[in-house]
Image (cartoon, rainbow, N blue to C red):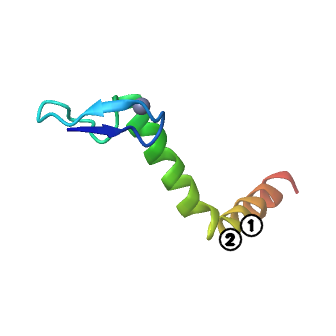
Amino acid sequence: MVVKCPTCKRPVAWLPENTFKPFCCERCRLIDLGEWIMEEKRIPGEAIDLDIDDNEDHFFH
Ligand SMILES: [Zn+2]
């Protein structure tokens, strides 16, 4: 059985020893994982950014 790597779209053999499946390699797995985490943080991210700005204001004034 062969699947496509979700990151680079290369064919990946679905083997028990392929610990990164459905990805072809650890790099592609981390890229996909990182994009997913960034998507997650983008929605509540504005509140976090405001907190950081407040801290910076205290620091500089
Ligand atoms: Zn890949």
Q: Residue 25 falls in which quadrant of the image?
A: top left
Amino acid type indicated by mark 1: Leu
Label 1 with label 2: CB-CB less than 8 Å: yes
Q: Tell me: residue 25, above or below residue 60.
A: above
- Tell me: is circle 1 under 8 Å from ligand 1: no
| Crowd rating for badge 1 (residues with CA inside 10 Å; few <14, some 14–19, many 20+) | few
> Residue placed farthest to the right in the image?
61
Q: Position of residue 19 (x, y in %)?
A: 20, 35
- On the rendering, which quadrant does ligand 1 occupy? top left
Residue 10: horizontal and vertical position, in percent?
41, 30
Residue placed under numbered mark 1 in the picture: 50
Is 17 left or right of 45, judged from the image as shown? left
Report the quarter where the N terminus lies: top left
Q: Which mark is residue 47?
A: 2
Position of residue 22 in the picture relative to residue 57 (left or right):
left
- Residue at (34%, 37%) from the top-left corner? 23
- Nearest the viewer among 52 and 29 is 29
> For residue 50, what is the image quadrant?
bottom right
Q: Residue type at mark 2?
A: Ala
